[in-house]
Amino acid sequence: MAPNSDDVVKGVDSLKISGKPSETPAPAESGAGAVPEKGDPSISANRMGGDMWVVKPVPGAGYGAVALREIARGTRIMADAPLFVVPTTVNDVKTMAQIIALGLKKASKDQAREFLTLDNAHKANGPLVGKASTNVHPMGGGGATEAGLFLAACRINHACVPNAQNKWRADLGRMTVHAARDIAAGEEITLTYLPALFPYAERQTILKEHFGFVCACATCSLPAGEVRDASDRRRKEINELDEKLGDGKRIVKHAEEMLHDAWRKLRLLRDEGITDAWVSRAYHDAFQIAIANGDQARAKVFAERDYEATVACEGKDSPEAAKTMQWVKSPKAHPLYSGKMQWKQGVDKIPKDLIDDDFEKWLFRLPKEGLTN
Ligand SMILES: [Zn+2]
């Protein structure tokens, strides 16, 4: 099953011009990197932040976007139009510099000036291409052919367990960012720049190589040893389960095992503190398993949960949410549905007398004693 949120993934694959790294290298790298070259680093970004967030210095990470008030899960933090757009397929630095210069010509003076205050993790490519490739967001998933410079969104630093989710909304022409969990006043807003849940050592290598900084987020600051190892094991297993759940050939023959895999993946995501688009993706997997086996009752519950998670991370107006709402209303309208299948039952079979653990056991077809792992 393909990811249902393209922006789970940052453009590590197409880094010529599509890396969005942290604002600055970690302190060990270059403390001075945090200082903008000139002017206010955040004129237009702060105008967009209103009373919700502001760009300001954050400990150990240069500048970052910080919540000015409590931001509830699902709140749209920003909907940012690109200052300019560049193709991700151009490898030639000179051509790229021309494209960026042309884009900047159309921008206001303030915005062009603000672009020039951004960090440059690829100095060898010159200021325009270096700053762009350091700060652009891919407009879409891994195969995105375009990337945009979003003056507000590019202020959001990376965390390995982020509290927000970005999504390129082609229908709006904007990059939206939503709170993936409740964010406290004074807390930094974060996104992940990584395409998968890598273990600690791999994360550090990729972030350093592609984005030029050493990650010192809460997850990377877990003490070495058992605590960090446990996080690494969870991530490894989530990836393994993700791959297994992507194997459509198993969906009927190994239906029950797959549903248990989805349950386990959701539990690992919860234990790792991950609340972004990974959650809707896991529920979408579960939905597909249920409906491919004719179970409209479970499929409806999974679709409802997928919908809730999608709305939280993309907004009620997202095309993905509208699509998911179709399955909530009529699970059997899904192309994978066939009434002949092994778990055939109608939506009226959602049990009304079960709550909490008992309901979850029913939902994921877990044995009475639960699953031990
Ligand atoms: Zn980290």
Image: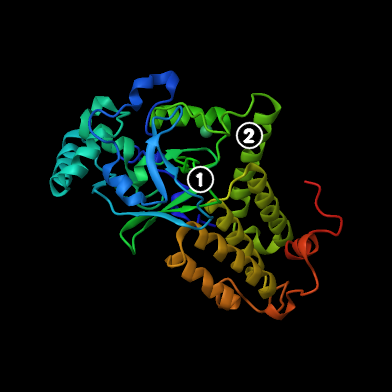
Q: Are marks 2 and 1 in contact (CB under 8 Å)?
A: no
**Residue drawn 68% across the image and 30% down it:** 227
Q: Front-most of 177 and 202?
A: 177
- Residue type beneath disc 2: Asp
Q: Can you say whether 351 is above or below 105 in the image? A: below
Label 2 CB-ligand 1 distance < 8 A: no
Q: Front-most of 325 and 184?
A: 184
- Residue 188 rendering spot, x and y as whole percentages: 47, 40
Snapshot quadrant of residue 254: bottom right
**Residue drawn 50% across the image and 54% down it:** 3
Within 10 Å of disc 1 (Cα), the crowding (few <14, some 14-19, many 20+) is some
**Residue drawn 77% across the image and 65% down it:** 359
Residue 173 located left or right of residue 289: left
Foreground mark, 2 or 1? 1
Q: Can you say whether 110 is above or below 335 in the image? A: above
Residue matched to label 2: 232
- Residue 8 rendering spot, x and y as whole percentages: 48, 49
- Residue 246 rendering spot, x and y as whole percentages: 58, 54
Q: Work out which quarter of the rendered image holds the N terminus and state it.
A: bottom right
Q: N-terminal of the two: label 2 or label 1?
A: 1
Residue matched to label 1: 185
Q: Front-most of 326 and 219?
A: 219
- Residue type beneath disc 1: Ala
| Residue 144 visible to an observer of this rendering | no
Within 10 Å of disc 2 (Cα), the crowding (few <14, some 14-19, many 20+) is some
Query: Is label 2 in a helix, a strand or a loop?
Result: helix
Q: Can you say whether 162 is above or below 29 in the image? A: below
- Residue 277 rendering spot, x and y as whole percentages: 52, 53
Q: How many labels, in total?
A: 2
